[in-house]
Amino acid sequence: MTRLTAHDLIDLVLDEGSWSSWDTPPSRAGVSDEYAAELAAAAERSGVDESVLTGEARLHGRRIGVLVGEFGFLAGSIGRAAADRIVAGIERATREGLPLVAAPVSGGTRMQEGTPAFVQMVRISAAVAAHRTAGLPYLVYLRHPTTGGVMASWGSLGHVTVAEPGALVGFLGPRVYEALYDRPFPEGVQTSENLYAHGIIDAVLPPEEIAEILDRALTTLMAAREGVAPVADPGEEDVPDVDTWDCVTRSRRPDRPGVRRLLRYAASEVVPLNGTGQGERDPGLLIALARFGEAPCVFLGQDRRGQTTDHPLGPEALREARRGMRLASELGLPLMTVIDTQGAALSADAENGGLAGEIARSLADLVTLDAPTLCLMLGEGNGGGALALLPADRVVAAQHAWLSPLPPEGASAIVHRDLDHAAEMARAQQVRAIDLHRRGIVDRIVAEKPDAADEPEEFCRRVGAVLEHELSALLASGPGSPEQRARRYA
């Protein structure tokens, strides 16, 4: 693998001629003659004075702060001087209100300095946390290799994290593992691709594509929150009083549009994210940064295509959703949830994974979230897995969407001990969007003409116009209180 130097990456990714260094010469006070000679030789070989460069630049015209690792300087290792530089760079970006892009490449802590260098992970992590607490984006591009204390601090704290294809990315360096345990580390574990498969990073992209994805992410993350021009209400249409069981059967049509077609036809920008960042992902949930018109949001959508008989919506999906909730809270972005599920998993794995607790925590997080919230009931709404994404400042529903404590067949089995009364149970339980609208649980209904599956593009665009209007209004009004959010269910 060809490894780009720090300056190579700066020239490739950032606007031409825009780089301005923040660095001052590092202090070498108190170092031994032998170590001083190593540092001087490293500077001579690499052409830089430390293992990290910090500065500012423009990315597609937008001013950003930048941290870039240099592997050529003592394998990108982090000693006290490098840590001082990183912390100073992060703190300057925070003071100046700049989004921060980090591109680490490192073997970890500098062994020549030992524990005094090792504990710098605490300072660096604290500086990143303060940057995030200030509501400023922190984006990470992991390069080959990124291991040890770098991976376990500023390499793993990104709002969005992308890695270089084929990169060695992990905590314990494989050479150290082999020396300690007298056997090689298992192949294929510490790779970008494996981290993506386990929901730890959001994407795997070559350096040539980083500028575009960073710009797209920042377009949403840095979108205006205040002074956003209101979007005209597209209006509401009368919807016919369709029979409840007809709504249920229509919502189950395999050709009914789901979240992917909604985003394709209705969103102006989509940057997919991936997993919890903590080793879990669920194909039944789609998490993304998105914009509808000019209105930005963190998007959490239950994906009907990703939910199968073999893999129904599990507790991992709700942990992934709660990552999105934290993003919205930190960055002050509206959160949009989409309900479209046959129901959460009913299995030993789901129980062992704490499904009930995840539903409870999702409900609590949504009710108390300090960001504006919007829910779209798009199709099926079965059980606690659907309810977990319902609480919001505003709730929009497709005409044939519905919400039920169990599939109607399950309710029939409990009450009548058969499946033959499913339609009757659905009617009795008031599951339709129109029923929920009458009770004040749903704020508005988007018409289907006569069925979303028969007009997928037109339906999605119609929904998108409503979502753009609702999001722009939420940006103006701000988040509701927990009391306001809970009141609609009284």
Image: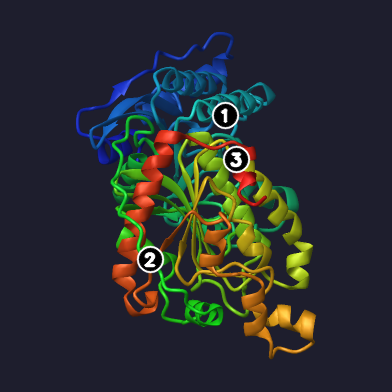
Disc 2 marks which residue?
238
Pair 2/3: label in front:
2
Residue 407 in sight from this viewpoint: no
Q: Which numbered disc flags the more N-terminal residue, 2 or 3?
A: 2
* Residue type beneath disc 1: Ala
Report the front residue among 146 and 87. 87
Does residue 177 lie above or below 130 as drawn? below
Expressed as whole percent of the image width and height from the top left, the position of residue 206 reads 35, 52
Q: Residues within 10 Å of mark 3 (few under 14, many from 20)?
A: few
Determine the residue positioned at 62% across, 84% down. 423
Expressed as whole percent of the image width and height from the top left, the position of residue 277 reads 57, 49
Determine the residue positioned at 55% across, 14% down. 33
Expressed as whole percent of the image width and height from the top left, the position of residue 219 reads 32, 41
* Residue type beneath disc 2: Asp
Query: Do labels 1 and 2 touch, CB within 8 Å?
Result: no
Disc 3 marks which residue?
484
Q: Circle 1 sits in a helix, a strand or a loop, which is it? A: helix
Pair 3/1: label in front:
3
Residue 323 in sight from this viewpoint: yes
Q: Circle 3 sits in a helix, a strand or a loop, which is it? A: helix
Determine the residue positioned at 33% across, 73% down. 456
How far apart are the alpha carbons under marks 2 and 3? Answer: 27 Å
Q: Circle 2 sits in a helix, a strand or a loop, which is it? A: loop
Q: Residues within 10 Å of mark 1 (few under 14, many from 20)?
A: some
* Left or right position of 55 against 142: left
Report the front residue among 386 and 314. 386
Determine the residue positioned at 43% across, 40% down. 474
Image disc number at residue 129:
1
